[in-house]
Each structure stands twice: as C-alpha cells, then as structure tokens.
Image (cartoon, rainbow, N blue to C red):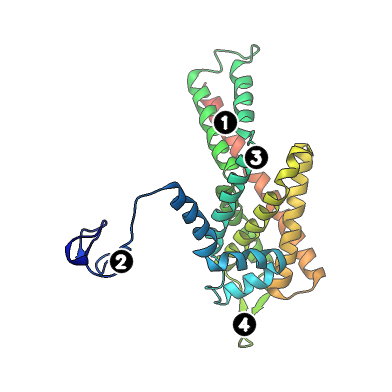
Amino acid sequence: MKTKNNRTKCLNCGNDYKGNYCPQCGQKASTSRLHLKGLITNVITTFVAGENNFIHTLKSLCTRPGHMIREFILGKRISYVAPIKMLIYLVTFYALFSYITGKDNSFYQEVEEKYEIITQDEDSNDEDFDEEVEETVQQTMSLLQVFLSNKVYHALTNAFFFVIPYRIYFRKRKLERPDGMMQELNIAEHFYTMIYQSCLMMLFAIAILPLSHIVKIEEWASFIFRNTLSVIFYIIIYKQLLKISWKRSITTNIATYITCIIIFYILITALLGSIILVINLMH
C-alpha cells in the first residue's frame, strides 16, 4: 500500500519502507487484492513457473525413474521436486481431473451401503448389536474410509510398510557414487524411492482416468492389475537405481513384494481378529 513520499506500507507487518520488498518480513510491495485472475496465475506458477523443475521431474519419472532417483539420493536435489511434494501435486491433479471428467469416487457410497446392511439387517440380534458395538463398527469403518480414499495417506503408509522388507532384501546391493565409492541405501533413501514410485503410479492413474468411463473392471481384476503394475515399476526403478541386471531386479522385487503382501494380510487379519474379540468382550 503506497503512502506519502512514494513509500510503501507493508500489509503484513506494517513496516514503512521504500523498495520492492519489505526489509523486515520480505513480503512483496506489489501485494494486491485477491481476484480470480490471480488465482489462475498462482495455480499455473505454482506447478510450472514457480517450480521450474516440475516438468523436468515429470519427464524423468516417465523416462528414467531409477536414474532420476539415484541422482536425487546422491545430492542432485535442486533439479527435481522433492518426492512428497511431487506426490501431493499429482494427487491434486488427479482430484481435479476426476472432478472435471465426472469420475466420482464411489468408495464413500460403498462404505455407507455396507454399513447400512450391517446395521439394518433384519436377521441381526438387536440385543447383541447394541449401541456401543455399533459405534465401534462405525468408527472403524470411518478410519478405513479416510485411509483408503486418501491417496497421499495410502502412498505414505505403503512406503512405511514396504521400507523394512526392501531394506533387508536389497541390503547387499549398493549405490555407485560419482567418486567411485559404493553406498548402501539406508531406510530413508528406500522410503524416498517408494514415494517416487507412488508418484509414477499416480501419473499412470491420471493417464487412464478417462478410460474408466468406458471400461468397467471388476474389483479383483483391478487389485491384480494395480499390484502387477506396482511390481513392474519397482523392477524398472531398482534396476536403474542400483544398476543391476534385469534378472536380479525381477527376482528380488517379486520376492520382496510377495513378502510384503503376506505380512500385510497377516497384520490385517490380526487387526480384524482383535476388533472382533473386543466386540465379543463388550457383550
């Protein structure tokens, strides 16, 4: 906001100064009202102009994901968008694209329908299914709803779950540094690798989203397809990342992925068993 003597009053901290930026807080002098045009400009600059490395990261993910991840791990950070930030960008694109194409997420509706079946089943014993048990079921399903419908949470949780098995299976495979030394991937580096793999999965989901209006796939087929695609991406990434043979990457990734799936279902079974046990104890 302009004042006398061509000075500017900072709208953030109230400092009176001359120049293009406030010397006290750093805010621009050209701060104006928020308008629709500015909103569109901010969106464009955030994803393109403001992030000059966004397009470069996008291109590298599609053409050379493992090489890109190796460069990021070895210190070439300014050239690429950080993995979690990139994932949030892509999930935002996916949500906007889903809205534009009219592809609604039916998971919420499916959960509500299943919950209605559970709570309104005429054959259910009303004395057994009391209000406390009903509340427990509702809270559990709400948590599952939030987890499964939020792709960022889902990707981060998968990364946390997969990181230990991948660290164990690939512990003997080392990364070649520019100075010729060999570096063993630590847990954090495997974690970042998996987040970038989730970014690649999101890119594929965005690409095939329009086809979902035409091709209807059963849930079991979709599950098999997603997991097969995930393994393929891991095979490509770790082959390029660690510069190992296709055979070594295929066998190790398949073994690791199967181990992760087995452990996952054991944990899910234990969780559901615990919930059932708690519900039975509440009667």
Q: Earlier in the sequence, mark 2 or mark 4?
A: 2
Q: Which residue is mark 1?
A: 277
Residue 272 placed where, x, y %?
61, 36
Q: Earlier in the sequence, mark 3 or mark 4?
A: 4
Residue positioned 66% across, 45% down in the render:
266
Residue 108 lies in what quarter of the image? top right
Residue positioned 25% across, 69% down in the render:
23
Query: Where is 273 relative to 5, above or below?
Result: above
- Residue 161 or residue 94, whichever sits in front: 94
- Residue 19 or residue 217, whichever sits in front: 19
Q: Which residue is mark 4?
A: 177
Residue 194 placed where, x, y %?
62, 60
How many angstroms separate mark 4 from mark 1 (CA)?
Answer: 52 Å
Q: Nearer the viewer, mark 2 or mark 1?
A: 2
Q: Which residue is mark 3?
A: 269
Check residue 26 in the rendering and tell me which mark sits there, or answer none.
Answer: 2
How many angstroms separate mark 2 from mark 1 (CA)?
Answer: 58 Å
Task: Give, as a three-letter code, the residue at label 4.
Answer: Arg
Q: Is residue 84 left or right of residue 5?
A: right
**Is mark 2 in CB contact (under 8 Å) with mark 1?**
no
Q: Nearer the viewer, mark 1 or mark 3?
A: 3
Q: Earlier in the sequence, mark 1 or mark 3?
A: 3
Give the SS element for disc 2: loop
**Extreme-right residue of the structure:** 247
Residue positioned 61% across, 65% down in the render:
55
How many angstroms separate mark 2 from mark 4 (CA)?
Answer: 39 Å
How many angstroms separate mark 3 from mark 2 (CA)?
Answer: 54 Å
**Extreme-left residue of the structure:** 4
**Is mark 1 in CB contact (under 8 Å) with mark 3?**
no
* Structural crowding at the residue carrying mark 3, measured as other residues with C-alpha within 10 Å and reported as few (<14), some (14–19) or many (≥20): few
**Is mark 4 in CB contact (under 8 Å) with mark 1?**
no
Task: Give, as a three-letter code, the residue at label 3.
Answer: Thr
